[in-house]
Image (spheres, coloured by chain):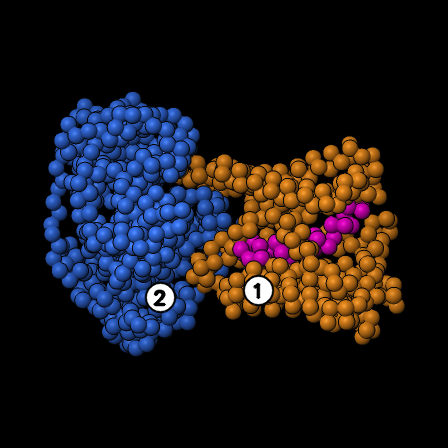
Chain colours: A orange, B blue
Amino acid sequence: MSTVDATAGEAPATAGEARSAGWKSSLRERLQQLLAFASLIVIFTFFSIANSSFFNYGNVTNILFSTVVIGTLALGTTFVIITGGIDLSIGTGMALCAVMSGVFITNWDLPIGVGVICAILFGGLIGLVNGVNVAVLKIPPFIATLAMMLVAQGLALVISDSTPIYFNEDPAYTKISTGNLLGFDFPNAVLVLLLATVICVVLLNKTILGRYTYSIGSNEEATALSGIDVRKWKIIIYSLAGLFIGLAGVMISARLGSAQPGTGMGYELQAIAAVVIGGTSLSGGKGSIVGTLIGALIISVLNNGLQIMSIPQEWQSVILGLVILVAVYADMVRKREA
Amino acid sequence: MDVAVPSAHPPPRYLLEVDGVSKDFPGVRALDQMHLTLRYNEVLALVGENGAGKSTLMKLLAGVYLPDRGSFRLDGQPYQVSGPKEALERGISIIHQEFNLMPHLTVAQNLYIGREPRLGGFLLSERALNRRAQELVDRLGLPLDVRQVVGNLTVAKQQMVEIAKALSYDARVLIMDEPTAALNDAEVKTLHDLIRRFKRADTGVIYISHRIEELKAISDRITVIRDGHYVDTLDTASTTMKEVISLMVGRTLASDAKPENVRADREVVLSVRGLSTKELLKDVSFDLREGEILGFAGLMGAGRTEVARAIVGADKISGGVIRLRGREVRINNPAEAARYRIGYLSEDRKNLGLLLEHDVAANITLSSLAERFTRWAFVNHKATRAAARRMVESLNIKTPSVTQATKNLSGGNQQKVVVAKWLVKDCDILIFDEPTRGIDVGAKEEIYKLLNDLAAAGKSIIMISSELAEILRMAHRVVVMTEGRVSGILDHTEATQENIMHYATLRPDENSADAAELGIGPDAKAGGGVAVDTEVGQR
């Protein structure tokens, strides 16, 4: 949204007033993002003061590194959630894509590049099926993707025969995640996340895909009556989220050096939490990519900081739950005052 | 755009023709041999009761359904489209009754949704979009900021966005379904100005409305349909609206009797003094007497609904006193209001007033379930059905049985179900917010009769309405509001269309001195020389 007031000529007085009101409301939208960012800073500062081993280059890159998988999943899911949908299949879907990456690269001996692209496209296929189920068969997104979550979990185990697939013969594969393309100690995985974020920002804000994502979430029927093929765009949006499932599958297996078929469950809720903390509304129509990234960062900063402070795992979960409540409540209070 | 008017042939007589179109749905014949012609340069009003087949006809024209029999012709050429997009491209633009806007997007984004200016097919050009939208809005003379988010606009402005959107398609046939349902009289005038400017030698408008009185002002001809059948087409100039109504309902209606004043010695049941809220209301004061129908008039956003919400405790009040039969009360939420026997019937019947999926009995007994129909937390269904049957009978609710799902009832009968709910609860004060919105003419009469009967039986009624005719006909006294204040309270002899509009459009600085005074009399009216500013910038 631009705040440039470039209209020349005289506007009617009422329109002039309306314009300043519009400016104010866009400021408010910005404030919301600033607020999420501010809370990230506050949490970050808190841990820096509370524990001396929190704020240093090694730990900060560590935090960024651990944001990659959740962040990647959350980016794609943001689109789906803005349409008013939900995607529960991203966690186990990611595990399935990791297994497929292992199948392509270790079992079938495809070149790493080809294998990676195939794994990402396989994620797109998962999303495509979700999209068709939701948009064509009109199955509610919660149910359609819940079913896909179970299907993906089962398939991952069936295909891998319930055993991890290792990438031992392709040490270059792990470099996708842990290598330092920049030449200094900065993991490639973080670069991938940043690149994915930029792509998503452009897609959501500068393309018709993004416009229709907001539009569908804001009022689906009106969008259809405006002559937009809602079915087609929903399928595209779910498929796009699927590509990010595939990417996350590659990133997690590259980090571990293996595809773990039994994992994945629970990641979807963390990713959705990141999206919600970032200010995206579960009822659709509203949300931002940068917010999602900040949400994902808040989660990993919390996890990391609490760990460093030797707070038990169980309590970390309690605190994360409370953070979600506070974030969503703060968002609602802000809206009520608006 | 293929405006195919073959030059060799004589020009077609009609812009749009509907010829013998029929459409069946399982169990219902929605349209039967429908016939309709729209001439060039005319506004054709299409009227009929709810369920007469108007919306089916619109959906056929939009390509949402296909007709079973019959055909359409546009400029004398066969017209058959496969969806809304194609209809728009052929020049048929439809403004649907329910708002079809994306509340989270800006005005500009809404106006050009699906047709945004693009760079290379996929990238958006926000600057070009805003420029184009601003040009459109300026051309139409609408006071809209194209960068503003639609959800933050008033209902009237949202309606303007709808209209601007429809006109932006280079439409030649503009179809409007109840465009004024949410507008007050001043805003209706703005809309009519827009329609008149749209009317050209190669365009036409089909105007669907329940507000019979506006047809005289805007239409050239009136086509009446009933139960999916074509009834008649009349020239507006040589027709009385009574004729139109009797054609619509298929019978003649009782004429409009005017109410008497309620005797001033009746007890004041509700007395409001200095009611204020943080958001809007400032120093609202009025009295409601037993057996009185107190009308609340004002422009959209004047604060009428907010007064009702503040009284029943749905909104927090920041100041003021509410007295019930002289006793000061503090009402914190609608449940407490119900305990004080105040019932609020929301304007948004479908979302806030009824459980549509549930049956009539469940709805009627909902509010009084705990106190009257429950023993040990078990609901006595037999008793609820019996109570519901008594209400169905006494209010003449048309339903096959009390176990019928409420969504299957007509709008008027749904409204009666809501009334019944509060009567079972034994309410003395009933606040009706737009009691006849979206209800057809025949059913309106029944609601009016019901209101009069309730008042005669000693119930006290607040009636909020955007239809002046309704206020004038029903209310014993009229409270006029503007910008959160009471700008005038008129008794029945003073309440005329002109007077109400005058007070409804007073600016706060002009009326702040005498705003809160009760019973504004002739001296206050002396200020009538002030220019009436209609608030909805008629440019």
Work out whether residue B131 or residue B329 is closer to the camera in this orientation and state it: B329
Mark carried by residue B327? none
Q: Which residue is mark 1?
A: A144
Say whether residue B490 is left or right of residue B73. left
Which three-letter amino acid code belongs to the residue tagged 1?
Ala
Q: Which residue is mark 2?
A: B59
Distance between the alpha carbons at the discs numbered 1 and 2 = 30 Å
Image mark 2: chain: B
* Number of other residues with Cα within 10 Å of mark 2, as a class: few under 14, some 14 to 19, many 20 or more: some
> What residue is drawn where x is 13% and y is 42%?
B258
Q: Where is residue A172, by image quadrant?
A: bottom right
Regarding mark 1 in the picture, which secondary structure is present there? helix
Regarding mark 2 in the picture, which secondary structure is present there? helix
* Relative vertical location of residue B177 with respect to residue B480 in this rendering, above or below: below
Q: Position of residue A217 (x, y in %)?
A: 51, 55
> What residue is drawn where x is 29% and y is 71%?
B28
Residue A143 drawn in magenta: no
